[in-house]
Amino acid sequence: ASAGGGVTNVVPYVPKAKQNLIEKSVTDAHTHSKTHTEEPIGTVSLSTLVSEETAEAETVGDMETAAVVLPEKSLEKSIQELYALQESDEETRMETQDETGDAVSVSRSRIDETKLGLPSPGGAVSVNLDETSFQGLIDMQQHTILSIFEKLFAGYKKAVVFGLADHENKGDSAINYGQYLITKHFNVSVIDFCARTPKHPCDYEGAKKKVEEEKQKGEKVLILCTGGGNFGDIWTDYAKDRETVVSVFPNEEIVLFPQTVKFNSQEAAKAHAAAMRHSKLTILARDAKSYVYLKQHREWDFARILLTPDSALMIGKQSPPVSPTHDILWVARTDREKEVYIIPDTFPTHVHEGKEVNTTVLVDDWTKFKPTHVGWRGKNFSFMGFSTKVVKPRLARGFEFLARGKVVIADRLHAHILCTLMGKPHVLLDNSYGKIRGYRETWTAGLSHVSVAQSPEEAVSLALRLLEDLETREKEQLKQETRESV
């Protein structure tokens, strides 16, 4: 960052394309006129609360987002091609019948899914670009996100956002803050938003009234629904919210931020698909398995289905806010997505400075870590105010939570993403239905210093290996710095 924490312009990193990703050549994925100024996101303090009046500056603090600037023309070739293949106009629509005998309009792309390197559901995935470095992967995913939203936001300066999180799951805060940064990057003003809780339902009719008022002024308003891992029948309240959004806004364009799809019941899937039919709805799938599922099952009749990384990647590279207190931090989720496993009672020693030493381990989950108490309801907060005063402090605590371990073992997707943003070595255990593995295999499989375990015992073994490797690298770095200072 520049002196004083100001905005730093960063030359975009251009990753090497995976050779077998896509063969088709596309000269330019962006065929529309740009409707926004290409300014960097800027430097964002995650450790300092900023007032709503000064939130646009966001220039102080030791946790900052790297500036992201789209290249003057097209992105790196393989990213162009990924986007262009998803967005191809070569589409056929046919009339078929559902189980009730009613006619259903079904969209089918003529493009072979294998050209995206995508598998049949449950198979291996190869759409990531083989990034091995944390920074390279962050840059690649940010550029992919921005290339897609540049198209989706074209012609829009106003939006409404539904489904924001108002609880202590730091992963949802990461998603929400990433979404805020996306709207900020494209200068899209959010005129209304909803962070529903059981005691605070969304005012859909009020939002609709605001949209109609903007339309009377000649403004287009984009309807946005928050992303995450709630597109399915595990977290049913979110499904009901989306169905309401679709029914209240039948004529507006709707975009669902990146989602993982998981239905345990085919009946529930068909019911949700029927309620979500909308001629102007775009859903962003954040992993290849979800993308293939939505493309292959004809009941999901959306305008567009695009493969897009998680919004939290827009936060960018972060420095750990605190020094580690333990060798290993074990993030063990406790909610309905938890995979049942037994954490060992004792842990092996490891080698530190040539000696066998005890391994210190902390087992915790971040939903109860340093809860925030921001009484924002009834205070006329704007979307920016909510994002910077409510969401941002929770996100900062998420980074602090993870920074306590030299190495992290985690069964939460956003522990994986936030550790990636901090460059922290970590081991992944999956959740109950493969969400973490799906994202890892789609976007982050090439990362060094990240391992995937099949069992708690293997997780411990891999974490100890990463720990010893980390200490070796730190020792070599110290030697290098000493030589350079002489």
Image (cartoon, rainbow, N blue to C red):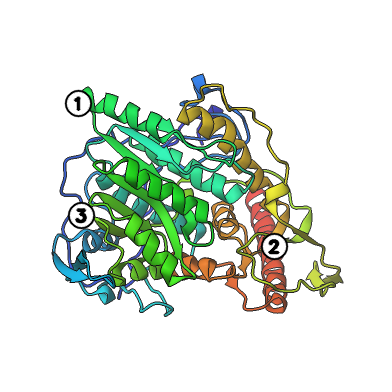
Q: Residue furthest top?
A: 53
- Placement of 163 over or under 335, stated as above or below: above
Give how far across and how far down residue 373 sits, in percent: 68, 33
- Foreground: 261 or 353? 261
Which residue is rendered at x = 50% and y = 42% of the image?
A: 164
Q: Nearer the viewer, mark 1 or mark 3?
A: 1
Q: Which residue is mark 3?
A: 29
Q: CA distance from mark 2 to mark 1?
A: 50 Å
Percent position of residue 369, x then y:
72, 46
Q: Within 10 angstroms of label 3, few (less than 14), some, or many (20 or more) residues?
A: many
Question: Type of residue at label 2?
Answer: Ala
- Tell me if mark 1 has few (under 14), some (14-19) or many (20+) residues whose alpha carbon lies within 10 angstroms of its own: few
| Circle 2 residues within 10 Å: few <14, some 14–19, many ≥20 | many
Asked if one can make out residue 208 in the rendered structure from this viewpoint, the answer is yes
Q: Tell us which disc is closer to us: 3 or 2.
A: 2
Viewer-side residue, 394 vs 222? 222
> Of helix, strand and loop, which one carries label 2?
loop
Q: Tell me if 240 is positioned left or right of 293 in this view.
A: right
Amino acid marked by disc 3? Ala
Q: Which residue position is annotated with label 2?
A: 332
Percent position (x, y) of residue 51?
56, 22
**Circle 1/circle 3 CB separation < 8 Å:** no
- What amino acid is found at the position of numbered circle 1 in the picture? Gly
Give the distance between the C-alpha atoms of the residues marked 1 and 3, in whole angstroms. 29 Å
Residue 218 - label? 1
Name which of mark 3 and mark 2 comes first in the sequence: 3
Location of residue 375 in the rendering, given as x and y in whole percent from the top left corner: 64, 28
The correct choice, above or below, for 258 with respect to 10 in the image is: below
